[in-house]
Image (cartoon, coloured by chain):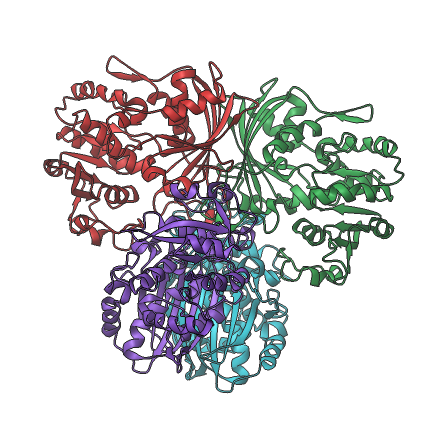
Chain colours: A purple, B cyan, C red, D green
């Protein structure tokens, strides 16, 4: 089988690097093009990231030799890629992502730019894979033929959305109060100053609480008249904190339901939960999307973030809540499941469903 | 004025050391006696803590030369002290604190042993100073003459109890969901293994959530028939986490009230809040017990824990909650306000009220 | 091929856990027996380490069900193992290791107990594989038939000994001043208190400087009359520091030679260096034992410790020294190359050379 | 006594903030002017640093209201200051410092710009206070009347230069190999990315080794013909590392002497060492410049950096070296002694000697 050619926009940044690291030896996709700002354009990729390659894994051999392209050259790059992953910064994404789509290239994006565009699906494939069927409407609205945009939500959600969804399907989530303890890699590089976070915690991340509260409503939303309409009847309150952890966002969740389930019902719902990626056996799909840890002090970022190659969500500490119904702790890897790995899973879903 | 002679039980441990560091040059109290386990007894204090003095400040000169006593010798030590601070481990506290009280020595304790003894006051002097009037009943119940026991609550509460109380008095707190991010010094020394907490967060502290949920009810309770009866009508749910921070417990709080106050009312209530320690101008009383930070990213443990010598509580990030009424962040120094400094303030209150 | 049965003594501790994690699916060895102190004996392994399994990887399925044995039962355990890995604490190792050897079971040890026993080889297989030929003399001295003891040196050495040896062979090392920055996992678990090391460095590790200075002399020593005689003519001075890093010991090295090599000669010597494990293609042998990093700021613990499954040594920053001849930075994974992985490589060498 | 008016150039940066924090209530100096880049000019100081005040101490009340000036307006600012502290970045310092001196304002600088200007003294007042007598020659060379430039050396030196000098005076230092473990605050703010340093060590700081090796030679140099001539006969080799510590640079030092002193001689030399600042009783002078810690695991950054208000150097672990003569560990506070505090001590020296 001939591999599908993927371009990476924003390839020199932290998420771009993670894409390259994860796509090495991908069974379906091969990186045909790396693009970044004009400043890096024209350099060999290995030179462009010299001294600022942040992954533990080495730069993949095939990527080292690629010449970095100027991401602004949408039309040219579009010809050499079957689709692109966008890890562009939001202001640049705003300008460029539509150009790629217009040029006929599907854009699988990590940027927040189009998360609230009503005909753009914001995907967690285990939850709302069916939202991809909005794509023809999106294309029609804009006169695009082959191109389109699909996005993933903010990394902070991933630690609690799938566990909540597994319960929501059966017992209807009503209220959620969630406090996140988020890793520094979520801020990119250089991101958080070490002087600010060693021996410290920062109880504020700009814009993060709003994303954590609102994006779930679109993800759980329904499609009507070519638009995704927010779910209603769910209230979420998020407290977002930065902690001195390299990778792995942890969430302390209190939740109430329309019908309060029993402990056994919750554990059973998590254990049996499978989504479209599991059914389709997508390459990056975790075998079991939600893994419950019985130990009283788990999940923990350093111990559990890499579960099933960083794509599974770990949960633990299920106990009754004195104010809402139940409490638990969730954890996911923010730069894998919450960023590049999540983007790859989206692309795999789109491929399996013949949108790529 | 002749100073009051204070003994320190558990003087070689972390909280005991903090007591010694804080009591140097205290205007009312002087440390007349340091006591610890049999193992340390008979050594000079400086020898007993050699290689395990954990304070940044040096050992006070006067303490260096004190001979460490065996804390089990309650009767003898009682003669040389006007009262004792107990920083004993709970199992030892259980055995010894009553012996000291029986021997005629008031015990101002940090241990959890007697927090739920119904005639023992559990004090945050800004909140429930009047609970000390239970002491005569306590003495009567046990046939003690001069001795008694007074305790302080768990350190995790301090970051949110005083701010909540300032609002509770006016608007009646109904429900609280709080997530704490607690410093490693709260576990004493050696406490948390560095291997467990570097690049990590532990979402569990044994017994801490129960204390954080229940102790407030006694603190806000009322006295009836020589007993302190828990407050009712308040529900608290606590998620307690350990984070890689040296000192300073941070709390993310969501709260609802019988009557939802306005933002201005809350800020005003915090700003104007003063308690008995402030009225009495106790030496360790913070001038303003609750300090609101306007910056969007404060309070932070490293920057704010030492506010007013570590005795004030810092709050910030007041914003409406999507589920309950309001949200905020609270912070206090866990080994000063939350441990030895809090104990000293209790003793000052007892002295000012002539119980010492 | 039938696998060789390996026992693990001290199986519940940190190094013991690392052995189990690394030996899963080993092509030659299978863990037939896990032994620990009497306290753990009789429990299932998964129960014995419940709440204190410190590896990111899960407990291997086959190990979970093994019943933990009392390590003191040397004779019984010896029957069920073809050899044992000893991760016992030194005082226990002192008592037990000889009993196992006497009972006919080779002991591949991580303990410091027998490092200075003159007929016990202290192995870094890339450097002194030939020292295993002392074993028959060792057996003869003690009247042991099949059993013997072979040990590995201290973890701190691994970051600089192999790079130094590669140069020593050609240019004769004369003087070495080395400063180590050592990870907390080197102290085992619980090891270093988090209160002592967050926002801090401890410029002292008990006994570590002596080991770092003296053990190289035996490793580079020669065999005469059934004894290993220290190398002479080499002076080593070590400054050992503990730093807040999870895994990976880093060493800053200044070195002088009998003949000062050129930069090109050094880089060439490192690049081409191969040892017996590489010749024998031992399963745990790194393909290239010494990997030079060209980047000006490498090697770094977090980025480079896992190189070649944690078995290779990374070096970098080769530059002339104003006082001695050359300077460089070395790095190795202290619990893999420096502990369990090193022990496994020793066992593989012994198997390939038919001592097991 | 009327206070001397001090301006602070680069007042909004990290070192500038440290100057403001330390100068509050200084007995001799008052901050009359704060200057920074054009971007901050015209704002109230409290606004200019809003959200980026990095000190634990609050902004001094008097500084809050000062209007930030454009540092480029040298002539105007010169009129309002009796001298200026320069915490400018090197490229800006290169342009502006001479302008201030030309305008008649002495410049006490932290920048590296003029460290190698031959008629500019580079001062550690305990070591080379007499170098200030080069100032008249400097003024003559440039036709300056009242203005001049005096600088302080790099922060990394402070942990070992004074201890070495105390020995050098008596026993003549010949060779030094030093490995530094440097705090992140040394890189300013934002400085080191948290992603790069959590669970890590970076064995490289650009330019730092060269400074650490060469600046001592000028500091120990002699004055001839209006120039400071480097000391000769001393060889220094430095390995500089960044570690995850907030404040406090630690140095592991091996040193040889013309005449090897005894342990008692070294301890005596350190204990009795006093310099000009101590003789003159300068306000910021530490009482005892070098403090030897007897504990085997001290000095440590977090415990010892604040010794004598962060102005003393702590030493410990004196032991013989296998390669050179002696080894020890030194520690100093890099943003106090090594930056703003050191600058203030320089200004105090200049004032006492009537250069201000």
Query: B89 or D274: nearer the eye?
Result: D274
- Which quadrant holds the C terminus of chain C? top left
Query: A254 or B212: nearer the eye?
Result: A254
The residue at 77%/33% (across/down) is D120
Residue D160 lies, in percent from the top left, at 61, 33
Residue C288 lies, in percent from the top left, at 34, 30
| Image-quadrant location for residue B148 | bottom left
Q: In the orientation shown, which residue stands out farthest toward the bottom?
A: B259
Residue A289 lies, in percent from the top left, at 29, 63
The residue at 85%/39% (across/down) is D354
Instruction: Identify whether B168 is placed above or below D270.
Output: below
Residue C154 appears left or right of D251: left
Instruction: Identify whether C143 is placed above or below A66.
Output: above
Q: Is residue B41 in view from this perspective?
A: yes
Query: C330 or A122: nearer the eye?
Result: A122
Residue A154 appears left or right of D185: left
Residue B228 appears left or right of D315: left
Q: How many marks?
A: 0
Instruction: Identify whether B298 is placed above or below D348.
Output: below
- Which quadrant holds the N terminus of chain C? top left
Residue B100 lies, in percent from the top left, at 43, 63
Residue C292 appears left or right of D90: left
Q: Is residue C110 in view from this perspective?
A: no
């Amino acid at each position: 089988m001939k591999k599908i050619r993927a371009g990476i926009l924003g390839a020199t940044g932290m998420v771009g690097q993670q894409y390259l690291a994860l796509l090495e030896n991908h069974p379906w996709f091969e990186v045909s093009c790396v693009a970044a700002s004009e400043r890096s354009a024209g350099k060999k990729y290995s030179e462009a990231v010299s001294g600022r390659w942040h992954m533990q894994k080495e730069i993949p051999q095939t990527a080292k030799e690629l010449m970095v392209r100027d991401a602004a050259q949408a039309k040219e790059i579009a010809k050499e890629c079957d689709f692109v992953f966008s890890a562009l910064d939001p202001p640049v994404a705003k300008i460029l992502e539509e150009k790629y789509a217009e040029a006929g290239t599907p854009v699988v994006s990590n940027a927040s730019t189009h998360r609230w565009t009503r005909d753009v699906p914001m995907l967690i494939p285990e939850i709302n894979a069916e939202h991809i069927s909005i794509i023809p409407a999106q294309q029609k609205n804009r006169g695009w033929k082959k191109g389109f945009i699909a996005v993933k939500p903010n990394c902070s959600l991933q630690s609690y959305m799938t566990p909540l969804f597994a319960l929501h399907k059966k017992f209807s989530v009503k209220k959620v109060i969630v406090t996140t303890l988020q890793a520094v890699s979520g801020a990119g590089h250089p991101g958080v100053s070490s002087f600010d976070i060693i021996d410290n915690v920062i109880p504020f991340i700009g814009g993060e609480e709003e994303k954590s509260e609102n994006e779930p409503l679109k993800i759980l939303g329904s499609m009507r008249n070519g638009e995704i309409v927010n779910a209603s009847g769910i209230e979420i309150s998020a407290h977002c904190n930065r902690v001195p952890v390299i990778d792995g966002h942890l969430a302390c969740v209190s939740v109430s339901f329309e019908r309060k389930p029993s402990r056994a019902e919750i554990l059973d719902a998590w254990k049996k939960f499978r989504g479209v990626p599991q059914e389709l056996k997508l390459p990056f799909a975790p075998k079991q999307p939600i893994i419950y840890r019985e130990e009283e002090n788990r999940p923990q970022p350093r111990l559990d973030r890499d579960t099933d190659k960083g794509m599974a969500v770990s949960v633990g500490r299920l106990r009754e809540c004195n104010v809402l119904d139940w409490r638990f702790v969730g954890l996911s890897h923010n730069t894998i499941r919450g960023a590049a790995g999540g983007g790859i899973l989206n692309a795999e879903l789109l491929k399996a469903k013949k949108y790529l």
